[in-house]
Image: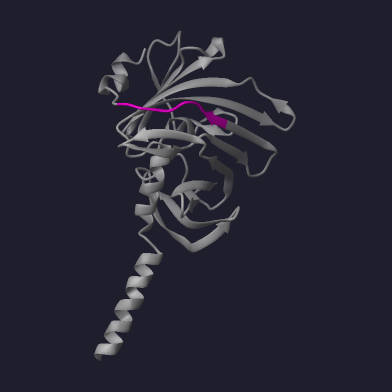
Amino acid sequence: MNTLLKLLVLTLWSTASLAAPDAQSILISSDQARGGGLPGIVWEITLQSRDGEKVDEPQRILVTAADESSVAETQEPLRFKGSKILQVERNMWLTKPGLSKPIPISPRQRMSGQASNGDIAATNYAKDYEASHLSATEKLDGETCYVLDLSAKHKRATYDKIHYWVAIERMVGVKAEFYSVSGKLLKTARFEYNNRIEYQGRRAPFVSRMTIRDALIDAETVMDFGTVKVKNVSASEFDLGQLQ
C-alpha cells in the first residue's frame, strides 16, 4: 500500500471514529441525566396514569438511589403510604405495612399504569443493556440524535430490547421504544429535562418528565420528577434486613 493510500485510509478511519462514538460510551454519558455515575441522588416522582378516559389517582413516591441500588417509598395516597420497593443490583423486593417480610418481585411487573417497577427504580441503562448503533443519526423534533439498539444483558432487565434516541448536542436520551424478546413493540417513552443538578462544580440537566404510552391501546403514565438532590447515600439505606 503506497503512502498516499495509507493516509487516505487513516483519514477515513479517523473521520468515522469522530462521527460515530462508541455506542456504549454514548449510553453511559446520557445516563448521567437520569442518575447514572452520580454518588447518590434523592428525588420525588409523581405518577399520573390514564387508560382511555379513566384517570387514576396520582401517586407520590420518594426515591433514593446510589450505584446499582435504590429504594422507592410511597408517600401518597395515604392508604399505600409506607410501601417500599428495594432494588439491589439485579434483585428487587416489595414490602408494605402488614407484610411479615419483604417479597421478591420482578422489575417487569407493572407498578402503576404503564410504569413498571424497573421504570421507577432504575436510574440508568448502561448497567442492564449492551448498546450498538441502530443507525448513524436521525432527526427528532429538530434535534440530531444517535439511535442506539439496547439489548438486555440479563433476564432481570426491565425490557428485552430498547431503541433509544440520544440528542447529540445535549447528550440526553429523548425517546425510547421498548420491545419484547420476539421484537413486539410494547411501549414508547419520551423524556424531558427541565431539572438541573449541581455536580462537580457545574450545573447539568436532569430528567423532569417521562411519558410512557402503550403501543396498542390508548393508555399512558406520566412520571414527573421533583427537585433532585445529589448526595452521598449510606449503604445501610439499601439493607434488606432494615427494609421494614
Q: Position of residue 195 (x, y in %)?
A: 48, 34
Q: Is residue 71 above or below residue 107?
A: above
Q: Nearer the viewer, residue 41 or 219?
A: 41
The picture quadrant where one finds residue 50 is: top right
Q: Nearer the viewer, residue 85 or 70?
A: 70
Q: Residue at x 47, y 43 (%)?
A: 159
Q: How is the image coloured?
A: one colour
The picture quadrant where one finds residue 67 is: top left
Q: Position of residue 97 (x, y in %)?
A: 45, 9
Q: Which quarter of the figure is the N terminus placed in?
A: bottom left
Task: Please identify the residue farthest to the top as the structure is shown.
Answer: 98
Q: Which quarter of the figure is the C terminus placed in?
A: top left
Q: Nearer the viewer, residue 60 or 114?
A: 60
Magenta highlight on residue 224: yes
Q: Is residue 204 above or below residue 136?
A: above
Q: Position of residue 161 (x, y in %)?
A: 47, 49
Q: Is residue 142 above or below residue 211?
A: below
Q: Residue at x 58, y 37 (%)?
A: 211
Q: Nearer the viewer, residue 186 or 149?
A: 149
Which stretch is magenta? 223-231
Asked if residue 118 can be seen in this view, the reply is: yes
Magenta highlight on residue 222: no
